[in-house]
Image (cartoon, coloured by chain):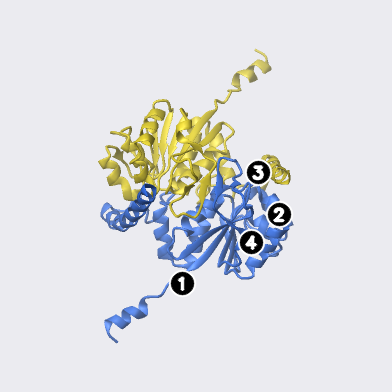
Chain colours: A yellow, B blue
Amino acid sequence: MNNQSKANQTVKTQKRYTVTILAYPGMTMLDAIGPNDILGNSEFIDLTWASTEKDPISNDMKSLALSDLTYFKDISSTDVLLVPGGAGDHYVMQRTDVLAWIKQMNEQTILTTSVCTGALILAKTGILRDIKSCSHWACLDELKKLGAKPERKRFVHDGKYVSSSGVSAGIDMSLYLLKKLVSKEHARDIRFAIEYFPNQFHLFNSYTLPKFLMAKLAKRFHAIFKHARSKVINEKNT
Amino acid sequence: MNNQSKANQTVKTQKRYTVTILAYPGMTMLDAIGPNDILGNSEFIDLTWASTEKDPISNDMKSLALSDLTYFKDISSTDVLLVPGGAGDHYVMQRTDVLAWIKQMNEQTILTTSVCTGALILAKTGILRDIKSCSHWACLDELKKLGAKPERKRFVHDGKYVSSSGVSAGIDMSLYLLKKLVSKEHARDIRFAIEYFPNQFHLFNSYTLPKFLMAKLAKRFHAIFKHARSKVINEKNT
């Protein structure tokens, strides 16, 4: 076997995945934006937001509105479904059309996931029955009443279900999803991109790595930044 | 002195603050949504988004658009200004009207802050000259060229300027801002609300606190949740 064919053998073609984030009135933005900026940052993932409404939706604190999202009924399948939480959770739990859509999507997903009280919405459809799950710490009793088996963890993976605890935990869960779907190295790259080193306990972090190593890493990022920055400027100037 | 007047003496009337988050095309959502969901969650803060555009703006990865924001020229002062980063940073650095607005706002702020490459925008206006500052790790050289004094830290506070490192560091910076503006206890409450315990090194965290203590904490949250949930349902049903 020559070197070329050896190399070809070791180059694994990375599968691409579709990720769909559910959006609804009264959602907590950080639940969804953590995953958006981690999973959507990956070149192996095509990310879409599915809105329960045709009009723009406001977040829980009404500080902003999201527009230009895809209406949920226009999405018929996804590899990964992600349901965020927020004050609008009980509203969605009353929407039988959305619950039916979640069940239908779940039949085709490879991973069905939630952040914070998004787990209550999943549980309401019945798909988390007897599944080890997480939610916001203040809602674990409610999750139990809906038939799931709550755990006090940052996030829990049981079968094809991955659920995280409150709001910010969606960040940790998303890095985990990326590791599972793509690779540990890829998840680490994205961790550097969003500089997620909230403490100094990571052996390799952006604050303590020697400068020459950081410079090497930076080189790759600069190429990406340059392209992305020009794109925004060009779009605004045309 | 009777008990009532003693109580009145110790009840410190909490000052309210206005926070303005700058929004622009090509911004990184997590830079701004971390602060939005921490500062905007506080009853002592009135949070507004100031957009550089009159039309809805797309984020860096174009997965969503923000609408219903206030046009930046319609905001003339704020206690705290927060400038996020993202691929659109260089676009904003070319917008002399936005740079002039930032300088004008800065004359009145009590804190001028940035997340990620938002520091480059602040530095471009000249206000970070010789100020100890942070930015995304891959952009510290660029920050230096713009006259600031970059440090490799999660966030840096120098004078009235607070700047954080990349993307997710805006979360840590915002909890710090809340501690400075309101109190340590209030910042801790909001930390519990967004369950920001990315590791187990917090002495008091939502995963390890005894259940009876969590139940006590939960009671207060349930009252807030109940109100917020009803509000979304009522709004959608009318």
| Circles 4 and 3: CB atoms closer than 8 Å | no
Same chain, labels 1 and 4: yes
Same chain, labels 4 and 3: no
Report how far apart the C-alphas of labels 3 and 2 lie in the structure: 29 Å
Q: Is residue B128 above or below residue A10?
A: below
Q: Residue furthest bottom?
A: B1
Chain letter for mark 4, please: B
Side of B37 where A215 appears, left or right: right
Chain letter for mark 1, please: B
Q: Which residue is mark 4?
A: B73
Q: Secondary structure at mark 4?
A: helix
Which of marks 4 and 1 precedes in the sequence?
1
Q: Which residue is mark 2?
A: B93
Same chain, labels 1 and 2: yes
The disc labelled 3 sits on which kind of residue?
A: Leu
Chain letter for mark 2, please: B
Kindly indicate the quadrant of the structure image that contains residue A158. top left
Q: Secondary structure at mark 1?
A: loop
Report how far apart the C-alphas of labels 1 and 2 lie in the structure: 33 Å
- Closer to the camera in the image, B33 or A27: A27
Kindly indicate the quadrant of the structure image that contains residue A226. top right
Q: Is residue B72 above or below residue B235?
A: below
Q: Which residue is mark 3?
A: A213
The disc labelled 2 sits on which kind of residue?
A: Met
Q: Secondary structure at mark 3?
A: helix
